[in-house]
């Protein structure tokens, strides 16, 4: 099940038959927020994510 980071979905993580996947946009946003802490790695990660969006 692909979800955003809404806490209500956490209960599904206890079910062995359900595999939770996060949203790439939420992951991308977290990396973007980390730019000031580690700009080089953040820029690399954002460029790699952009390649996925191009698919």
Image (cartoon, helix red, strand yellow):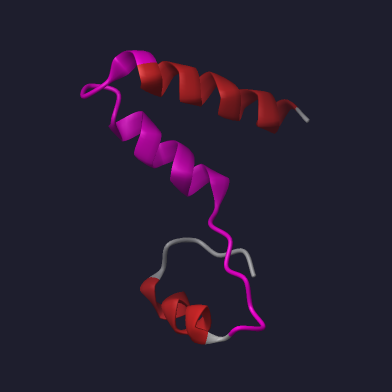
Report the side of 34 relative to 48 (left or right): left
> Which x, y percent locates residue 14?
49, 84
- The quarter of the image holding the N terminus is bottom right
> Which x, y percent locates residue 44?
47, 17
Report the side of 8 relative to 34 (left or right): right
Q: Say which residue appears at 67% left-offset and 24% top-offset.
A: 51
User: Residue most toward the right?
Assistant: 55
User: Residue most toward the left?
Assistant: 37
Which of 15/54 is in front?
A: 15
Q: Is residue 52 above or below residue 47?
A: below
* Residue 25 on the magenta span: yes
> Which x, y percent locates residue 16?
60, 83
Q: Which segment is the magenta one?
A: 16-40
Q: Is residue 15 above or below residue 1?
A: below
Q: Is residue 7 above or below residue 2?
A: below
In the rendered image, which quarter is residue 55 located in?
Answer: top right
Q: Say which residue appears at 48% left-offset and 25% top-offset.
A: 45
Number of numbered tags placed on the structure image: 0
> Which x, y percent locates residue 27?
46, 44
Report the side of 37 relative to 7 (left or right): left
User: Residue most toward the top?
Assistant: 40
Q: Say which residue appears at 52% left-offset and 82% top-offset.
A: 12
Q: Say which residue appears at 21% left-offset and 24% top-offset.
A: 37
Q: Is residue 12 above or below residue 54?
A: below
């Amino acid at each position: 099940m692909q979800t955003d980071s809404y806490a209500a979905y956490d209960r599904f993580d206890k079910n062995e038959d359900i595999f939770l996947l996060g949203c790439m946009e939420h992951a991308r946003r977290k990396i973007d927020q980390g730019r000031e802490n580690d700009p080089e790695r953040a820029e690399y990660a954002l460029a790699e994510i952009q390649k996925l969006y191009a698919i």
